[in-house]
Image: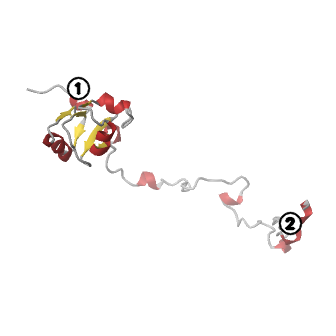
């Protein structure tokens, strides 16, 4: 195969539209750009949201609501079955153990969820527990140690 045998063949390709080559071509005079205005000029570019200098819609409409994301508290959920499978036969599971096994990223807030069954008594330490998870652990004779969120740990109790 040679270069001249490649498809599409040169005679089948549409030739490039050459504008501004006389009125008889149909693309002379204004070259398909219309009469006057910003878009008829050379190098004419404007951002899609530009409204020609009038007050933009984003500034015409009022602001609403608020952003709470700087204060959002995100917990890393861990199901009971996965937790107990990772620590099979261990009677006490601390937060550091959870981080070391890779069940949660180091320093993440951990919440234990109730998916799975607890067969033996086990002491579990986490920031938060679902009500059913805590119930299952205590029903099996275990102990729940809820550390709370860091904000709750640093706040001084008012008496």
Callout 2 environment at 10 Å: few (<14), some (14 to 19), or many (20+)?
few
In the rendered image, residue 148, in percent from the top left (x then y), is placed at 22, 33
User: Which coloring applies here?
Assistant: secondary structure
Residue 84: x and y in percent read: 28, 40
User: In the figure, 80 relative to 10: above or below?
Assistant: above
Q: Quadrant of residue 40?
A: bottom right
Local secondary structure at mark 2: loop
Image height of 34 relative to 54, above or below: below
Where residue 107 sits, quadrant-wise, is top left
| Of marks 1 and 2, the one in the foreground | 1
Measuring from the top left, give residue 108's x and y in whole percent: 34, 34
State the residue position of label 1: 154
The residue at 11%/27% (across/down) is 158
**150 on left or right of 157:** right
Which residue is identified by label 2? 21
In front: 120, or 129? Answer: 120
Residue at point 90%, 62% (across, down): 1
Q: In the displayed structure, would residue 36 be above or below residue 82?
A: below
Q: Residue furthest left?
A: 159
């Amino acid at each position: 195969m040679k270069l001249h045998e490649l498809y599409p063949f040169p005679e089948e390709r549409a030739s490039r539209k050459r504008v501004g080559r006389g009125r008889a071509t149909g693309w002379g005079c204004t070259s398909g750009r219309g009469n006057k205005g910003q878009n008829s000029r050379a190098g004419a570019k404007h951002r899609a949201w530009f409204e020609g200098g009038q007050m933009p819609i984003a500034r015409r409409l009022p602001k609403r609501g608020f952003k709470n994301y700087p204060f959002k508290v995100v917990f890393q959920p861990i199901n009971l079955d996965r937790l107990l499978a990772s620590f099979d036969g261990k009677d006490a599971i601390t937060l550091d153990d959870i981080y070391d096994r890779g069940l949660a990223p180091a320093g993440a807030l951990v919440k234990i969820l109730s998916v799975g069954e607890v067969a033996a008594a086990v002491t579990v330490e986490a920031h938060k527990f679902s009500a059913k998870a805590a119930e299952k652990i205590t029903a099996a004779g275990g102990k729940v140690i809820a550390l709370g969120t860091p904000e709750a740990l640093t706040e001084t109790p008012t008496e």
